[in-house]
Amino acid sequence: MTLDTSVERLSLALEEPFTISRGTQTHVENAIVHVTDEGGMTGVGCAAPSRHYGETADTVAAVLPELLAVVEEVGDPHALHEIESRMAAVVSDNPAARCAVSIAVHDLAAKRLGVPLYRLWGLDPEDAPETSFTIGIDATDRIREKAADAADAGYSVLKIKLGTDRDREVVEAVRDAAPEATIRVDANEAWTPRETIEKSGWLADLGVEFIEQPVPAENPDGLRFAYERSALPIAADESCLTAADIPAIADRCDIANLKLMKTGGLLEARRAIAAARAHGLEVMLGCMVESNAAIAAGAQLAPLLDYADLDGSLLLESDPYTGVDVTGGPLRLAETDRAGTGAVRESPGETVSDAE
Ligand SMILES: [Mg+2]
């Protein structure tokens, strides 16, 4: 079989600047991958590179030709294991680039069979948890407004980015603005282990559900120290990228926060979920700020999750792709009723020329 492939770079503006403890984003660049079979059916994938993991739109564009050459050589969109393992052998880093290709090939394989991916995997869409809605670091009054707006829009789970000297004031404002909401907090590595233990006490008093990545990934002993003494469960994000990282975090957190753009593909994401379960961890699937072309793929895994944080497209000013509808929180997998990931191009968007 002959498979044709192509790449398109998309510039995506955020609705508002998004700040976490490491910095602020106002726009992101995603790379869209197309894989087309002889009958003209096309699978769509998306890379959302993260500088934190050493990737940019340029590094993605640089390695995609090698990865797409693997797809063309294999020539069979149903050979998902072979394609994903050969890609990892060709390009060991660059997980977002590999993930875009993995999503596109999975999308094409499921479309050829006429089923959504969750059906291909035998999952029940009713098991999908609601997604949280993320509120970045901002002026406290603005955070209060955003929390009230999100609660009004139906979001029952709010994820609050922390890591400033106003952490307590911020969480108190969110609790005040959204008294019924489930609140999760993410420090993105900004705290010390002792600070984590101290903050966990008043965070628990404010009814927070869990703390995500309080301490730097480079401090695994600190993570264990905090985990053993924290008043709240601990989720690991920056500390776990692939299935191979799961055994090392299993005795120092309660929840593994996986992301497609960290695992490098949908098969590896499923392996990481299975590894986390085997080690007694709960599982969350997060995302980058990214198009529905990627979010829709993550949503297909939602029935396997305890917690979903798949709001990346909700933070965009506009997204050329429609995917699985997550507005208001519920991941409406069954209602999407489209084969593959469910991602569909609705508008041209802003394409970036990669000609240097
Ligand atoms: Mg996180």
Image (cartoon, rainbow, N blue to C red):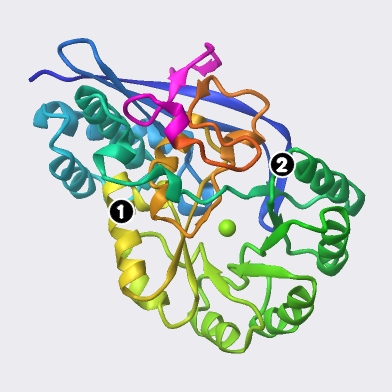
Horizontal side of residue 6 vs 74, given as left or right: right
In the rendered view, tell whether residue 99 sits above or below residue 291: below
Q: Residue at x 16, y 20 (%)?
A: 3
Label 1 CB less than 8 angstroms from ligand 1: no
**Residue 277 at least partly seen:** yes
In the rendered view, tell whether residue 346 sits above or below residue 151: above
Q: Which residues are magenta?
A: 334-356
Quarter of the rendering containing residue 179: bottom right
Q: Give the residue at mark 2.
A: 154
Measured as percent of width and height from the top left, residue 155 is found at 69, 45
Measured as percent of width and height from the top left, residue 298 is found at 43, 43
Inspect the magenta stretch and tell me whether residue 336 lies in it.
yes
Q: Residue at x 13, y 37 (%)?
A: 79
In the image, 243 versus 330, the foreground residue is: 330
Quarter of the rendering containing residue 113: top left
Q: Amino acid at mark 1?
A: Arg
Q: Give the residue at mark 1.
A: 270
Callout in the foreground (1, 2): 2
Cβ–Cβ below 8 Å for labels 1 and 2?
no
Horizontal side of residue 175 vs 99, given as left or right: right
Q: Residue at x 84, y 46 (%)?
A: 148
In the image, 37 versus 282, the foreground residue is: 282
Measured as percent of width and height from the top left, residue 65 is found at 27, 29
**Residue 356 at least partly seen:** no
Q: Amino acid at mark 2?
A: Gly
The secondary structure making up most of the magenta span is: loop
Q: Report the quarter where the C terminus lies.
A: top left
Q: Residues within 10 Å of mark 1 (few under 14, many from 20)?
A: some
Q: Residue at x 58, y 34 (%)?
A: 313
Q: Quadrant of ligand 1?
A: bottom right
Q: Report the quarter where the N terminus lies.
A: top left
Secondary structure beneath dot 2 equals: loop
